[in-house]
Amino acid sequence: MDHAPVGKKLFAISLILSLALLIATTIPHILHQRTTIVFCNVGQGDGAYIRVENRMDIVIDAGPDKSILTCLGRYMPFFDRTIELAINTHPQKDHYYGFLYLIDRYRVQNLFLNPVQSTNQSFQQLLLKAKQKKVNLSFPTAPTQLKIRSARLYFFWPPQTITQTQLKDSNDASFIVTFEQNAVKTLFTGDAPQSVLQTLLGKSELKSDILKIPHHGSKNGLTREFFALADPTLSVISVGKRNSYGHPAKEILEMFEASKRKYFRTDRDGDVIITMERSKIHIKTQNGAERRNGEKAPKFKHSEECCGFP
């Protein structure tokens, strides 16, 4: 008895089902014009991923190791292997080292580096690898504005003059940048110290809905005055479990308790995922903190409506 026709039919059916599954998982990613911001749990470091309108990918800092790849693997579509823009806020290992792995895994088109450079061997290795991979390197200073589809990036720090001075700490030149879309603004502060934050107190444009707390919640970072200026609805502390620095500092946590503002910690909540689609904003965490605590999603000052969790 000839089983060949049966085998061919089974193969054809299997192929059709596989194609149907591929289409079913791919088409929604393409059609939904939503923007997702993920504050990645990269341990004691910073790493954030932004997918703009399901079309373009941005990475702001990449953490101290290859953990950023795990984060991107969760939220970046498998068929997309290009990162249009990578930004390193300043040349410290807990912010840039993951880019060494990122450039090997993905095609990175543009890398924005801090104008204040480092002679550290691993940072020089990053520069060399970026050139070998033909990544476009840029060194923006404030004020710089970049339009990415319907979103905008604004660089508020460092000014061009700071590159002409001798800095004791590269934190003093850390990028301070906002990402704004659909009237919702997210403020990234890198490891900016109090002295820099105080310098920017006159800039009302820094008023934001979402704030990435500077320097992993160090007591030498966020000030009450800057927190009042930013006036965020939601804040995120990117910090590692049981880190040796004692981050986040009790002074920072007390600031949140006094303000009664919502905040997340990547050491406890894991990745923090914020999805924006038209006027709707969804917030969830990798460890399900919102569902576990039974809390409602915070209402954003600049959104027409805010909804609960999907």
Image (cartoon, grey):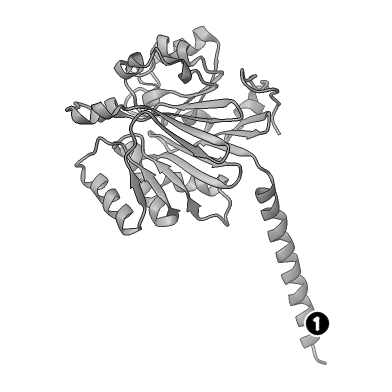
Residue 65 visible in the displayed image: no
Instruction: Find residue 235 and report its horizontal and vertical position in percent.
Output: 51, 22
Mark 1 sits on what residue? Answer: 6
User: Position of 117 compared to 288: left or right?
Assistant: left
User: Please, is residue 145 above or below residue 300 in the view?
Assistant: below
Q: Residue at x 53, y 49 (%)?
A: 73
Residue 87 visible in the displayed image: yes
Count of numbered circles on the image: 1
Of 260 and 43, which appears nearest the observer?
260
Of 176 and 224, which appears nearest the observer?
176
Specify the farthest residue to the top: 258
**Where the C terminus falls, by quadrant?**
top right
Q: Disc 1 on helix, strand or loop?
A: helix
Residue 222 lies in what quarter of the image? top left
Instruction: Inspect the image, locate mark 1, and give the three-letter code of the amino acid beneath it.
Output: Val
Instruction: Find residue 112 and report its horizontal and vertical position in percent.
Output: 36, 41
